Amino acid sequence: MGIDEDPATGSMHCMLTPLYHRLTGRSVFNFYQAHPKRGAEIQGELAGNRVLLRGHAVTVVRAELVL
């Protein structure tokens, strides 16, 4: 449809980080998500009951929502 797709899926890495922690005992993981045009490098870190995601991002839309 001509809609550009995000090369990274943060929600998936939020689920993979605790899973891999249970399997390996490690707390920090470096992921690479492949994409036909560009890939994404993401670091996931388990910090207590939270997952911290790190990587590079580009702002493509900026908006303000007033309620």
Image (cartoon, grey):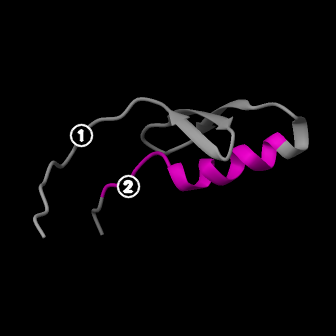
Mark sitting on residue 5: 2
Q: What secondary structure is marked by label 2?
A: loop
Q: CA distance from mark 1 to mark 2?
A: 14 Å
User: Magenta segment range?
Assistant: 4-21
In the rendered image, residue 27, in percent from the top left (x then y), is placed at 75, 32
In the rendered image, residue 38, in percent from the top left (x then y), is placed at 44, 37
Q: Is residue 34 above or below residue 65?
A: above
Residue type (three-letter) at the residue carrying disc 1:
Thr
Left/right of residue 29 with respect to residue 37 in the rendered view: right
- Quarter residue 17 falls in: top right
- The structure residue drawn at horizontal position 24% and vertical position 40%, both measured from the top left corner, is 59
Residue bearing mark 1: 59
Q: Residues within 10 Å of mark 2 (few under 14, many from 20)?
A: few
Left/right of residue 50 with respect to residue 25 in the rendered view: left
Left/right of residue 26 with respect to residue 52 in the rendered view: right
Query: Which quadrant is home to the N terminus?
Result: bottom left
Left/right of residue 6 with respect to residue 67 in the rendered view: right
In the rendered image, residue 34, in percent from the top left (x then y), is placed at 57, 42
- The structure residue drawn at horizontal position 53% and vertical position 37%, both measured from the top left corner, is 53
| Residue occupying the far front of the picture | 48
- Quarter residue 66 falls in: bottom left
Q: Is residue 25 magenta?
A: no
